[in-house]
Amino acid sequence: MAFATYSDGEWSGIRLQPVEPLQLHPAAHVFHYASTCFEGLKAYRHADGSLHIFRLDRHIARLRKSTELLCLPVPGPEALEEAIRNLVSACADDIPPYPGALYLRPVICGTEPNIGGAAHAVNEAFFFVLASPVGSYFAGGGEKMLRIFLDDQHMRSTPDFGAAKSGGNYAAALRHIVKARDEFNADQVLFCPGGDVQETGAANFFLLDDDKVVTRTIDGSILDGITRDSLLTLARSNGYTVEERKILVPELLEWVRSGEAALSGTAAVLAGVGTLIYQGQEYAVGDGQPGRNTRRLREMLSAIHSGESTDELGWLAPVE
Ligand code: PLP
């Protein structure tokens, strides 16, 4: 893991060390006031053995944005980039070939021991990056079409905190996801407060057909997905009309009579939705089978990850 500490207004150098338990005071700010945020990104091994981190600059920018929203200190972008690259180099022998990858999890948390500190930004923090070899989301053959519960009563986060990739947002959404899984065997909840189709607990949401790709506007209420941005860029340059706008539940139910729906994120790239569950009724998405546009866009982005397509947009950061 990469590891650094912050105190007295300064970060220590970021060093690599074996993964080991961290020592924290029980009064550490993060335990009480959830001063923590993280990122999730992947490094891929290409067929020629070379290693590449996908959209490292965007992930660093989003981590910095999350730290701002949480009043946490953050190492400079160059230091973050160097730490992540060094960690990937150090783990090179453990990175499986594509479609496997090395999943990287940078975390920043407030460690200042101060239970009276609810209204104060921390003066002490940890930064660390975990690295884990992962297999393909679609391993095991066959594409499992997702069952998604539409929740029009709750919001995953809040209108101005959904852009923070912070544990508190996942904690706030969890009970709705557990309930939908228990009651409806749903894989995920699509949060649609007041009918506004937003995102699921851990992915952005897309509607697709042969001409169009539609997804919700980024306005601070949902996570600014980096897979989302990448897919929209590829869709535009491959002749799709891209619409970033509000989607309401009635439009969604109408769309899926013939169109496709999918979830986007670092783990799965773009995963097809087969069934929507809304007000006790099940709605098949198209014919319930993987959609051709979902597949096409997923394959385009996967080909960049794997090195099969040229990285014309400079999304891959090579690692020595
Ligand atoms: N929305 C939420 C709430 C997420 O947790 C994630 C994934 O991490 C995403 C969207 C997709 O983001 P990205 O494509 O950057 O992985």
Image (tube, rainbow, N blue to C red):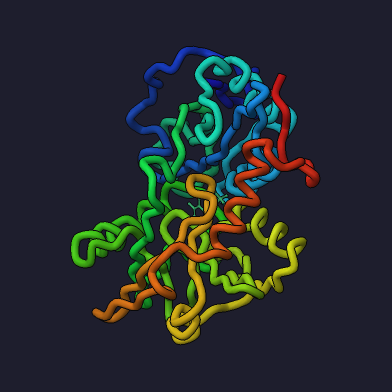
Residue 60 makes an appearance in the image: no
Q: Can residue 209 be seen in this view?
A: yes
The residue lying toward the viewer, choosing from 101 and 173, is 101
Q: Quadrant of residue 160?
A: bottom right
Q: Which residue is at a point 52% across and 60% down the rendered structure image?
A: 204
Q: Nearer the viewer, residue 254 or 10?
A: 254
Residue 56 x, y percent position in the rendering: 67, 37
**Quarter holding residue 80:** top right
**Is residue 84 shown left or right of residue 148?**
right
Where residue 171 appears, as percent x and y from the top left, is 36, 52
Q: Which residue is drawn at 55% across and 23% down?
A: 5
Looking at the picture, how far across and down is residue 124, in whole percent?
53, 30
- The image quadrant where one finds the C terminus is top right
Q: How many marks can you see?
A: 0
The quarter of the displayed image where residue 47 is located: top right
Question: Which residue is at the far left?
Answer: 183
Q: Residue at x 57, y 39 (%)?
A: 41
Q: Residue 183, percent across and down?
A: 19, 66
State the residue at coordinates (23%, 62%): 185
Judge left or right: residue 310 versus residue 194.
right
